[in-house]
Amino acid sequence: RGLNRASPVHACHRQAVFVRRLPDACLDEIWVSFPDPWPKARHRNRRLLRADMIATLTRPLRAAGVLRLATDIDDYARTATRAIEQSGLFEPPSVGRPDWRIETVFEKRGFSEGRLSVDLSWRKISQAES
């Protein structure tokens, strides 16, 4: 209670259960920075931002709170966007890298391999709006 800032939590798809311990509507933002893309089709169910996880992962997000995604994998951006839009919990995304976001090791590696990063953010719709 009374926390103004929280430290980042590094979690994979299995460890994301930590959000179940958080109270409803306690976070202003959730950042997902360069998550593991799990590129093989048989592993897609391990992705963090997928249709069956959106409501669970974002339950602690306040109304008008922001979900942010930074990735350099086009397919991840597309499938995450589709899942988030289908949830009906968020406004359409805005695109653009925030000035304050640092360049990550994963972003640097992707750039050196010819991939450009994309930053997407969605604002959560309040229950009254939905």
Image (tube, grey):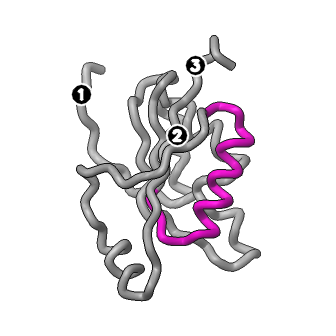
* Amino acid of disc 2: Trp
First in sequence: mark 2 vs mark 1: 1
* Label 3 sits on residue: 126
Q: Main secondary structure of the magenta part?
A: helix
Q: Secondary structure at mark 2?
A: strand
Residue 66: x, y in percent?
45, 36
User: Mark 3 or mark 1: which is in front?
Assistant: 3
Q: Secondary structure at mark 3?
A: loop
* Label 2 sits on residue: 122
Q: Name the residue rendered at 53%, 50% in the picture.
A: 16
- 20 or 35: nearer the viewer: 35
Relative vertical location of residue 48 with respect to residue 107 in this rendering, above or below: above
Residue 48: x, y in percent?
58, 56
- Asked whether the beta carbons under mark 2 and mark 1 sit within 8 Å of each other, the answer is no
* Label 1 sits on residue: 4
* Amino acid of disc 1: Asn
Q: Name the residue rendered at 28%, 54% in the picture.
A: 101
Magenta stretch contains residue 103: no
- Asked whether the beta carbons under mark 3 and mark 2 sit within 8 Å of each other, the answer is no
Residue 17: x, y in percent?
55, 46
The image quarter in which residue 106 lies: bottom left
The magenta segment is 70-90
Q: Name the residue rendered at 45%, 47% in the picture.
A: 68
* Amino acid of disc 3: Ser
Name the side, left or right, on which 38 lies relative to 109.
Answer: right
Spatial CA distance of label 2 from label 1 is 21 Å
Q: Bin the neighbour count of mark 2 within 10 Å (Cα to Cα): few under 14, some 14-19, many 20 and up.
A: many
Q: Name the residue rendered at 27%, 45% in the picture.
A: 7
